[in-house]
Image (cartoon, rainbow, N blue to C red):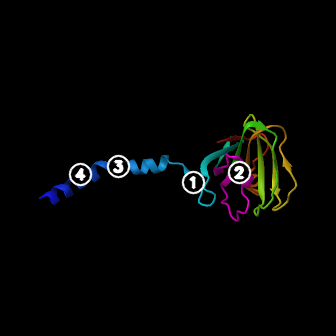
Amino acid sequence: MIRKTLLGALLLAAVACAPAPGEAARARQSAPAVHPVSGLEVIPLTVTHAGKKFSFRVEIARSGPEQARGLMYRTAMGPDEGMIFPMDPPRGASFWMRNTVLPLDIVFIGTDGRISNIAANAVPYDQTPLSSVGLVKGVLELNGGRAAELGIVPGDKVEW
């Protein structure tokens, strides 16, 4: 009898603690997505060009070490993936391709949220600094040639 009562109490406690239908799915959707290689949070980012929005899922490199590593050593990235480097406070930025295997478009985002300049098809492993024109609030890295493929140019709006 005690065993049945204890088993019943445990079963009742498990049911009471179980999430309501749909609650587990909502919790998964609200949890930040994490990139399987870098472990960085993945967020949505859009670039608006001539009224058309291009959507990307980008890793966000917030800390100094995350920004220093960037996309170094990565051998693959999807066509609508990238990495965003927020700059707070805004500042002039220079990037290089040290230990970077993939060619990249380095998109500099001015303080107004518009693209100030693009270092297109940056050459893998090249240590030549690629610099922003003026202060930037962020830098977006995409696969090399992707900006031209989509028609993304300076003046386009970037939101994340």
Between label 4 and label 1, give the one nearer the viewer: 4
Q: Earlier in the sequence, mark 1 or mark 3?
A: 3
The amino acid type, in three-letter code, at marker 2 is Pro
Label 2 – label 3 distance at C-alpha: 38 Å
Between label 2 and label 3, give the one nearer the viewer: 2
Residue at 60%, 50% in the rendered image: 41
User: What residue did someone put label 3 on?
Assistant: 19
User: What residue did someone put label 4 on?
Assistant: 12
Query: Across the whole image, how many numbered discs are drawn on residues?
Result: 4
Residue 53 position by quadrant: top right
Instruction: Identify the secondary structure beneath mark 3.
Output: loop
Between label 1 and label 2, give the one nearer the viewer: 2
The reply to whether the magenta stretch includes residue 69 is yes
Instruction: Tell me, yes or no, whether the two marked residues, 4 and 3, touch with CB atoms within 8 Å.
Output: no
Label 4 – label 3 distance at C-alpha: 13 Å
The amino acid type, in three-letter code, at marker 3 is Pro
Coordinates of residue 25 in the picture (x, y in percent):
42, 51
Coordinates of residue 103 in the picture (x, y in percent):
78, 60
Between label 4 and label 3, give the one nearer the viewer: 4
**Nearer to us in this view, 112 or 131:** 131
Q: Is residue 44 left or right of residue 9?
A: right
Magenta stretch: give its range.
Answer: 58-82
Coordinates of residue 7 in the picture (x, y in percent):
20, 58
Label for residue 34? 1
Label 1 – label 2 distance at C-alpha: 17 Å
The reply to whether the magenta stretch includes residue 61 is yes
Instruction: Identify the secondary structure beneath mark 4.
Output: helix
Q: Earlier in the sequence, mark 4 or mark 3?
A: 4
Label 2 – label 4 distance at C-alpha: 48 Å
Q: Residues within 10 Å of mark 2 (few under 14, many from 20)?
A: few
